[in-house]
Amino acid sequence: MPYDIAIIGAGPAGLSLTRRLKSSGLSIALIDKQNVTSLQNPPADGRDIALTHLSVKLLKLLDAWRRIPGEDVSPLRRAQVVHLGHFKRGLVESLVAPRRITEVTFPIEHEDGSVETYKGFRVLHNRVLGPGKGGIRYHLGVNREEVVALATLMTWKCALLGIPFGGAKGGVCCDSKQLSETELRRITRRFITELGDMIGPNTDIPAPDMYTNEQTMAWVYDTYDVLHPGRNNLPVVTGKPLDIGGSLGRAEATGRGVMYATERFLQKGGVPGLSSLENASVVVQGFGQVGNTAAHLFTEKGATVIAISDSSGGIFSLKGIDLAAAETYKKEHGSVVGLPNTTSITNEDLLLLPCDILIPAALGNQITRANASKVQAKLVVEAANGPTTVGADDILT
């Protein structure tokens, strides 16, 4: 079929570009495919693991989804744009690749005297609208591809909402739960030292993310400040403690956003028979900063949180979870599992509990084609990064 522009690559850049150009009346062809045999343990339909929810919807809108063989699709590796003179050649391509990718390795001495080498990443995807903006995460799953993808998403999140920042992301591959505060401080200071001028108030501004918090950001700030004396370096990082320029309400902002979005969706009639959070039954996977905050705020609105979980497992009670007791128990025992007057369940089973609202607030790819048909929630509210796969989305919607 004739088209004005062909975008090869249905990644975040290609998708956002397609949506913007489609609204202008241009004829777009969006294509993303690769032989699935190169993937490890692929599902029956390779399209599920290759494309985001938005890409699938766009491909269906363009009547291209049915023409892409399910066994011939894999994750985006490269995006290219073919255009017919509507833009200056090279302009669109400049929006595809990250501005820079910084990868560092550094040794850290543990408190027991042993030395371990850690790998860290910082990706600045785009800074057209302002300094790059994105969190720093400490997790064993941190790798180059993940950080690039998350940095890219930050570009489009900021652009679509009109926030004057670009996209960035960073992280260190480590098991933060097995590290002491002293060791985490050493990792943070060395990581920031290695990054040097790759971050800064006018270039790339970090923030808290998975398994980092305001204390981590305080270490980021004072390390950068030592390396760059004589300047106002407070803007180098957000999510700092209040006493060094942090913002009131920052710690609970994501969880509060989850609550506001859910309330608005219900008010607009998104779930028949459920117009508010009053008396709604809620299940929360993940009891970290986002999940914990969301659970408390939903409770304040009259909902009953019947199940929560952390990385070790979950707990369930039809009468509702005592969130304060759960927090205390987790601090004392390292997990919410085992809280008196609750039933212990796995994270997998927690997703399948009958409830009004399910909030995945932990890791990505939790609801898949394999378990989506068993999800009994009336509404799934995604609080994590990509907790639902494309195959699951097709089933849930």
Image (spheres, grey):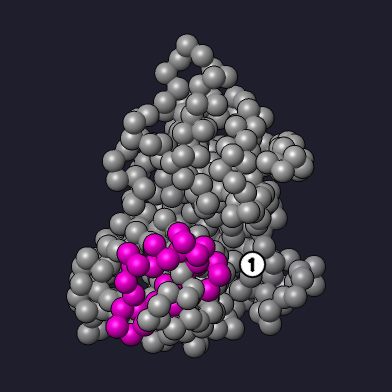
Judged left or right of residue 178, residue 379 is: left
What residue lies at 56% left-to-right and 43% top-to-bottom? 181
- Which amino acid is tagged 1? Ala
Residue 72, compared with residue 238, is above or below; it is: below
Residue 312 colored in magenta in the image:
yes
What residue lies at 56% left-to-right and 48% top-to-bottom? 137
**Residue 248: x, y in percent?**
29, 41
Task: Please tell me which residue lies in front, 344 or 229.
Answer: 344
- Most extreme residue toward the top is 230
Q: Is residue 306 visible?
A: yes
Q: Which residue is mark 1?
A: 50
Query: Which element is circle 1 on?
Result: helix
Place residue 330 in its image quadrant. Answer: bottom left
**Residue 325: x, y in percent?**
35, 67
What residue lies at 71% left-to-right and 37% top-to-bottom? 108
Residue 260 colored in magenta in the image:
no
What residue lies at 27% left-to-right and 62% top-to-bottom? 297
Quarter of the picture holding the N terminus: bottom right
Estimate how packed mark 1 is, as few (under 14), some (14 to 19) or many (20 or more) residues with alpha carbons within 10 Å: many
**Residue 298: x, y in percent?**
27, 67
Give, as a single range, the part of the protein colored magenta: 306-335
Q: Is residue 61 visible?
A: no
Residue 324, compared with residue 188, is above or below; it is: below
Place residue 273 in its image quadrant. Answer: bottom left
